[in-house]
Structures are given as structure tokens and as C-alpha cells.
Amino acid sequence: MNYRTIRVRYQEPVCYLQFYRPEDNNSINELMIEECTHVMSRCEDSISVVVLEGLPDYFCFGADFQAIHGKFAGGQPIEHDPEPLYDLWLKLATGPYITISHVRGKANAGGIGFVSASDIVLADETAQFSLSELLFGLYPACVLPFLIRRTGFQKAHYMSLMTQPISVQEAYRWGLVDAYDARSDSLLRKHLLRLRRLPKTGIAKYKQFLGELQDSILKFKSLAVAGNREAFLDPANLKRIYHFVETGSLLADKDA
């Protein structure tokens, strides 16, 4: 397959999926969601481990504000359907494979969704993690069910309110990161040496069982999708996004 937003390679039983939108800081658009979903579906039968990677400076930086700005500036209707992205994260969390996020650089907003939905999170010392949504009047509705499952309610709540990046050391203490190292490539290889030994059938049954034990991400899907859709279609929030792309600064609340 000739993908436009990702790069994919297979070393069975491992699939390496790299987010690749370098000109847009690996932000998430509809095509990226579609291409990632296609890869995850292809992996269901024969792949035991899926490794998500980004670029050295950006793992994934959330929604594509440039695309929203372009539609807003051109007077085009803003259509927003967060369900495909939520379903993609469900595949990461519950699919019949082990999912690993290998984080270098910045993971923000929707990027935290990919991280939180993964079974294992590995990072290097450059990694930073943030939820910036409230700066624009948004809130991380779709991210929170996955993040709360990983870190607990209060840490996810604090991270949402503060909007500032946390270091890899803090993310490790909170349970968002499972292991980190200055040589994260070596850390990944060590994990894969162990994980390659696990039989595919055992992984699939274990992930199914785990999904039944922790069903919150399924239970709260409709609430999360509805909240995300409402926030991204709010005219005041769209105006904040437009202003930020235009000027690089946040719009005062009285001007929204």
C-alpha cells in the first residue's frame, strides 16, 4: 500500500507504524485515521505486536488545526466526526495484538490518545506529554476514557486543567509511561525480544479478557464522541483555533 500520512514496515510478527506528516508536526487528519485503521485491520490475523512511532521531535501533536483554519477561512462548513478516531484507539486497546507507543519528542492532545490506548508505552528522555485542548475552549473528551484508565482520574484531570507539558520522568511516575531510557531504541528492542515469544492466540484471548475486565472505554464511547463533536463545532472554539493559526497567540476569552 502507498500510504500518504504513515510509513509501515513488517518484520513478522511485528508491524512498525510510523506517523509521517513532518510538515504538520504529525497532526491527525482524516486520512491518517483511515490509513492507520487500515493497517490495524490488516494486522489482526498474523501480527502479534504493533509499534507506533513518530518523528524525533514530534510523536503526534493532535488535531490538524491548519485544516480547520483553511476551512474556516474559506467559509467552508466544518464537519467533525470523532468516532473513527475513537474506534481506532479502541482497536489499539482491545485488538488481538500487543500495541506499543515508542515516544520521542512531543505528544499532545490526540497524540495522548494514541499513547493512552497502547498496551505498553516506551519513551526516550526527550519525550513530553500534554493536553492543550482547554486553551482553545475544547476539552479532551475522547482522550480521557483511555487516559483515566492508565493514570487514574485525578492525574488525568490535573493534566487537562494545567495544559502544560509534563516530562517523561513525571509521566513515568503517573503511569502514563511504562519505561524510558536515553537509548529508547535499545529499550524497544529489549521489549520486542520478550514479546516476540508470545503466541498470537494467547495474546488475542488475553486482550479480549482484559477488555471485558476494563470496559470503561467502551461504556463511555458515546458520551466521549458527543462531547468531542460539540466542542469542535462550537463557533467560539473555531474562532480561537483560527486566531491561533493566524497569529500564534491565544485569543482572549472576551474576544471569542
Image (tube, grey):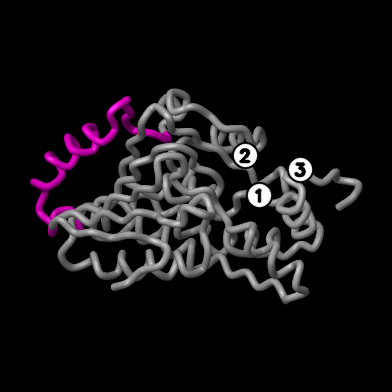
Characterize the local packing of mark 3: few (<14), some (14-19) or many (20 or more) Cα atoms within 10 angstroms.
Answer: few
Earlier sequence position, callout 3 versus callout 1: 1
* Residue placed under numbered mark 1 in the picture: 139
Q: Residue at x 27, y 58 (%)?
A: 208
Q: Quadrant of residue 161?
A: top right
Could you say whether the residue bearing mark 1 is in a helix, strand or loop? loop
Q: Are marks 3 and 2 in contact (CB under 8 Å)?
A: no
Q: Amino acid at mark 3?
A: Ser
Tag nearer the camera, 3 or 2:
3
Up/down of 101 relative to 4, above or below? above
Horizontal arrangement in the rendering, residue 96 relative to residue 200 (left or right):
right
Q: Magenta region: which residues?
A: 176-204
Characterize the local packing of mark 2: few (<14), some (14-19) or many (20 or more) Cα atoms within 10 angstroms.
Answer: many
Q: How many marks?
A: 3
Up/down of 135 relative to 234, above or below? above
Earlier sequence position, callout 1 versus callout 2: 1
Q: Residue at x 75, y 53 (%)?
A: 246
